[in-house]
Amino acid sequence: MATMTHGEASPDLFGQVPDRASVYEVSPRDGLQNEDAMIPLDGKRRLIAALVEAGLTRIEITSFVSPKWVPQLSDAEELARSIKPPPGVSFSALCPNARGLERALAVGLEEIAVFLSSSEAHNKANINKTIADTLSVFEEIVPPAREAGLRVRAYLSTVWGCPYEGDVDPKVALRISQQLLALGCYQVSLGDTIGVGNPRQTREIVRLFQGEMPSSSFALHLHDTRGTALANALVGLELGVRDFDASVGGVGGCPYAPGAAGNLATEDLVYLLHGMGVQTGIDLDKLILAGNVAEQVIGHPLPGKVHKAGPFRLRKARG
Amino acid sequence: MATMTHGEASPDLFGQVPDRASVYEVSPRDGLQNEDAMIPLDGKRRLIAALVEAGLTRIEITSFVSPKWVPQLSDAEELARSIKPPPGVSFSALCPNARGLERALAVGLEEIAVFLSSSEAHNKANINKTIADTLSVFEEIVPPAREAGLRVRAYLSTVWGCPYEGDVDPKVALRISQQLLALGCYQVSLGDTIGVGNPRQTREIVRLFQGEMPSSSFALHLHDTRGTALANALVGLELGVRDFDASVGGVGGCPYAPGAAGNLATEDLVYLLHGMGVQTGIDLDKLILAGNVAEQVIGHPLPGKVHKAGPFRLRKARG
């Protein structure tokens, strides 16, 4: 199934998965912005270094949202200036507006990410704008960013459900995604922001999108709040999706309670992918070490499972 | 797909799932036997009552293993005598040998479960016998149990991998399962005992078994140690499996560390099933209450996710 990227999976591919998948790591940004405490710069640098060492090649390191809103990432410039990606690795940052783009350009980043929701009520709650007004802002920053040589990714939230509106019509998400791609975004990351998605929905969403664009134009950003993230990822994978967002240790993604899960843990995703023969270029043992670094840096246990359980290793038999 | 129970899924059923699934609840036995502390009888009764109230109809309430080995369940007789299943509900107990069968018959249970491993090293470590010798013991108890009117279920452990031997040939598990069914067991519950299974393996195992027996002759007993339980359940479901073991709150299943996951949490399984339109007869809200009862009775947080996150409910929009 090396070339299947467009249209519906043919039925005889039941159970087939791509040879390779790409993981987009969000822990330094999406993870740390959800921590109460501001993590010191050195801790952020240690986490990012551990992720690079594990083989992650796409890492969202910070956000150029106003420090007023996300004080945890107010060291964005200092962090971005102090670490440079090695060859083959791309660092990106969240970027809400023209001011954010200026800041990203000033520190020499190669990629930014814009974000909005597929439900009006969540978009209003999150960025205090209508979806149309948010897209107007993106019209002012995505083309200039592209002209300046940046790659631009987009996050689209609440695709599986909105905490305020309930069900969301995936056709709305599709139309917004098409506008984002038309503006110059290379990929839209579809978010199950509150972790309510089930595999049937995921199949409907993925097939709807695959009918209108190549699979490489979208990614799945799944939350494990109700334990369904890997089941949803599996559905995407079986339909030919190769791009998944994840966060080492499962840090971030607005968990509602201590020990509860938000973001899908990168090590849990990679354990599943490797077990199914899907290559990622990531070293699982080193990724588990990165999860341990994340726990040290953040200072509390994280919900990811494989960094606790470890990979499958033989024990010595008793008796 | 109302009648698909035998043979491989036909390819055009990609993404189809059964209308209905049956959940076999193991928390009072498999959960509580893994706790350090002995839970008082009244706590066990409260947990079982909450499970019945939530609509579980198949509950393994205790074990007639020697109290020397599992002191946490040494009140097996007292518990079984003090609660009777309402109409339509079946209580069962683990039963290793002739002495266990005597005890089960004395308290009037209608169902027992026998257990062994599909790898010699694990069987030796767990019950200090070869697989052949264990089957010989079952020859002495399963037919008499059937003659006495009991239903007999079997657990087969380490089907996805053995902590001592590594990979396990699923054909060995198949042969043992066929022997168990021939002895008179109505169903073999296939265990991913150490939670290492991936969906590719699950597909291979399920298809191998479906080639030789109806799907109703086996169940999936999945552990969430590495987060893969629901992805594995999904594969089974899509192939037509309708029987799944689970434990409310995710209690038990030998977790290696506090907060780590062993058994698949019943509420996480039911959330996925209901979201996909698969009926279970279980009330998810009441099941979440049963998870809370389990936490109270056991006295520490449990790893299940949906009893923390709750089902998908609307929040009031801000602003």
Image: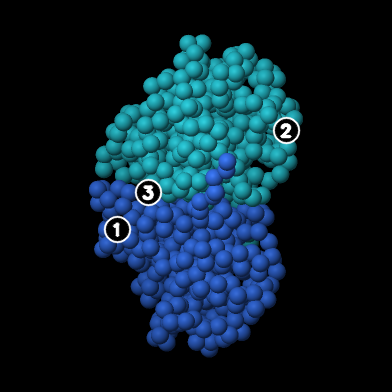
Chain colours: A blue, B cyan
Q: Name the foreground residue: B317 vs A85.
A: A85
Pointer 3 and pointer 1 on the same chain: no
Kind of element beneath mark 3: helix
Q: Residue B39 carries which label?
A: 2
Mark 1 to mark 2: distance in Å?
55 Å
Quarter of the image for the C terminus of chain B: give it.
bottom right
Q: Is residue A47 above or below residue A245?
A: below
Q: Name the foreground residue: B45 vs A273.
A: A273
* Circle 3 residue: B200
Q: Residue A216 at what x, y percent from top left?
A: 34, 66
Question: At 26% across and 43% down in the image, what residue appears?
Answer: B11
Instruction: Please report, as a chain letter, where disc 3 is located.
Output: B
Q: What residue type is labelled 1?
A: Gly
Mark 3 to mark 1: distance in Å?
26 Å
Q: Name the foreground residue: B14 vs B203.
A: B203
Q: Name the foreground residue: A79 vs A87.
A: A87
Q: Residue B303 at what x, y percent from top left?
A: 62, 47
Question: At 60% across and 77% down in the image, what residue appears?
Answer: A45
Instruction: Please report, as a chain letter, where disc 2 is located.
Output: B
